[in-house]
Amino acid sequence: MTTQDMLKHIDHTQLKAYAAWDDIVRLCDEAVELGTASVCVPPAYIKRIHDTYGDKVNICTVVGFPLGYSVTGAKVAEVRQALADGCNEIDMVVNIGDVKNGLFEKVEDEIRTIKKECGSHILKVIIETCYLTEEEKIAMCRAVTNAGADFIKTSTGFGTGGATREDVELFKKYIGPGVKIKAAGGVSTREDLEMFLNLGCERVGTSRCMEIV
């Protein structure tokens, strides 16, 4: 796989709390130059990016990030504002507390609600694998599939661990045929990137794109 082929699968990411506009401009300029799949940015920057770059960059943002325990109504409001501001893709965090309490149907219902709000826009569901048991990960594969989301995503990058080969292989075994995989968290080398793409990930999220390529 060539570098250019790999870049088409990268969500070029800048989600640090202290990210300034100069950081966002650098990210977007790099995305335009390299041809990455998207830029993944804080919601507060969506409108300014859209006004500045138009259709030159595909804008992705995060919802319920990074802890996931916002109420569903708050997540819906975030999605509505993000789409109104010019965002195309949403990466939402599930309510991890609900997962740990075994409330899998409730989590599925929330994902379904958010997907309905997204409409034709891509929804990626972050399950934060580092906090879950294998049983809970399998339950989330089923919830994401049943709710009609487009992607299951490993991690926020803000938890205690990131994407692993084992989790991606588990996803492949239990997700439905319409669900794609995004690996994120700790992807810092070309070898990491190649591994996840060769495992079948459609997207890889990383803040180290320039170092990798």
Image: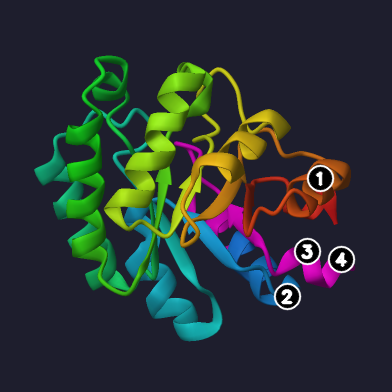
Secondary structure of residue under mark 3: helix
Q: From the viewer's side, name the closer residue of 66 and 154.
A: 154
- Sequence order check: which comes first, mark 2 or mark 3? 3
- Residue type at tag 1: Met
Q: Nearer the viewer, mark 1 or mark 3?
A: 1
Residue type at the position of mark 3: Met
Tags 3 and 4 touching, CB below 8 Å: yes
Identify the mark at residue 195; answer none if there is no mark: 1
Gap in angstroms between the C-alphas marked 2 and 1: 24 Å
Q: Which quadrant would the N terminus be assigned to in this image?
A: bottom right
Reading the chain from its start, which is encountered first: label 2 or label 1? 2
Would you say residue 152 sits in the magenta stretch? no
Residue 3 is tagged as 4
Look at the numbered discs 4 and 1 and tell me whether their residues touch, using CB distance below 8 Å: no
Which residue is pictured at 31% across the width and 75% down the height? 120
The residue carrying mark 2 is: 33
| Span of residues in magenta | 1-25
Mark sitting earlier along the chain (4/1): 4
**Which label's residue is closer to the chain start, 1 or 3?**
3
Tell me the residue at 60%/45% (across/down): 172
Q: Residues within 10 Å of mark 1 (few under 14, many from 20)?
A: some
In this rendering, the label closer to the viewer, 2 or 1: 1
Q: Residue 24 appears at what percent x and percent y?
A: 53, 58
Residue 71 place in picture, x, y as percent: 14, 35
